[in-house]
Image (cartoon, rainbow, N blue to C red):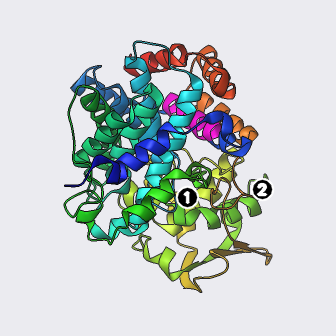
Amino acid sequence: MTSAADGLAHRAARAAAGLDVAALSSGVLVSVKTHLLDCLGMILAGAADERVKRALAATGRADVPFLLSLACGALGLDDFDEATRAHPGAVLVPALAGAAMAARQEVGGADLAAALVAGYQLFGGLGEVVDAGRMHLRGHHPSTFLGVPSAALAVCRMLGSDIATTTDAIGIGASLSCGITEFDERETMRAVQTAWAASAGLRAAELAEAGFHASPVALEAPGGLIGRTGTSADALAAAELLAGPPWHIEQVSFKPYPHFSDLHPVSAVLIGMLGDQRLPPEHVEAIQVRLTQVAASRLFHDFPPRNAKQAKRSGRFALASCVLAAHRVGQGSALLGAFSAERLADVDVLDLAGRITVIADLPPQGVTGSVTVTLTDGRIWSGDAGGYPGDGRDPALRWGWSDAVARYGDLCTAGSCDPELGSALLDMVDGLERVDDVRPPLERLCRLVLR
């Protein structure tokens, strides 16, 4: 019989328990703060989303992580892990905020920081073992599949659970993992599944604290979370990934645009070309975009898109929206509302999209895309794409604290949030490692979502 000490969940619990925020580099701590601040900003901006309101009416106030996660993902800008094709922040931050709300004693900022590092680490480590970047092809939704045990671990680390309890929580979380990729047209079920992961992660930790037990090999056994995917999992190799460094949280990207991430590099190039000049779309003769075959294969190519799900994956529609947003408001960075029902019928976007061509002919190595804009006056602009602003895979493109604060301000404005609440959350995150109790500002945030 396998002992608990042999299992991957136990190894993950032990690694998390040994995390000391004071020993982390300043770069890792900045990553923790930027991801936390961005997720809190998303929740502020998405608190009034109609899906949050409908879920609140259906479930009442009992499931705080579920509602916070729906708000976090409402704008489609929640952080994105290119390696696992998942949204870890929309799972982990709501789960931890819900756990803090339920805690009967002070929750220190250093423990919250360590919990985020541990949660992102398990997300990334498990994701690498199961080849999560290709999970969609097998019908699994990575955010939910990986999110439940990762959130359970994070909650236990923040609350100071012992290693045995944390081990059980991870195993219980593995047994609650689910998620399919057959989403509805608005992808509401994608958001609901992600919210379920946040909620179930907290529940798994609570069940473990109440004395429920799980198999010590609930992750790696043939019938476990990893084993049942059909991948060849090496538990020892996976355990090494969990201990760090490197710390996975540094490699997770921020989404600068709400459309499909494979279009972010070429969108960044196009928006950079436009600058602040508010180029009228009628001055554009044609736009030609080149992508790798892998990137192009994940796009939606029929036109026009019939719903938001298709539009977000339509290179023609997304890039036309970039040009129109830059023309109308002077920037195309956030593209908020670009995939609403009204914008799907926007004749200016549809007309410009008719002059955009997407070609799949780039080699898999080198640049990830290129953009050529031909203007009606004969001028030609062109540029190659590599990463994009906030791309966690490239240290030169990762967002620093000032980038996160700037976007947080935009999100607070978009959500018309109480300036005092916005400042309180910003102050908490800025001095996170020194905060004695994170609950007061998080309680105010939860009241906003639950009102």
Which numbered dot is residue 348? Answer: 1
* Residue 345 placement (x, y as % from top left): 43, 55
Q: Is residue 67 left or right of residue 364?
A: left
Q: Is residue 147 left or right of residue 93?
A: left
- At x 26%, y 57%, the residue is 180
Mark 1 is surrounded, within 10 Å at the Cα level, by few (under 14), some (14 to 19) or many (20 or more) other residues, namely some
Residue behind mark 2 = 275
Along the line of sight, which residue is nearer the eye, 359 or 138? 138
Which segment did they paint magenta? Answer: 32-45
Residue found 66% across the figure and 19% down from its top: 423
User: For the residue carrying disc 2, how many other residues have a C-alpha within 10 Å: few (<14), some (14-19), or many (20+)?
Assistant: some
Q: Quadrant of residue 344?
A: bottom left
Instruction: Quarter of the image for the C terminus: give it.
Output: top left
From this view, report whether residue 367 is shown above or below residue 227. below
Give the residue type at disc 2: Gly
Residue 375, quarter of picture: bottom right
State the image coordinates of residue 20 (x, y, percent, origin top left).
60, 36
Mainly helix, strand or loop, the magenta region? helix
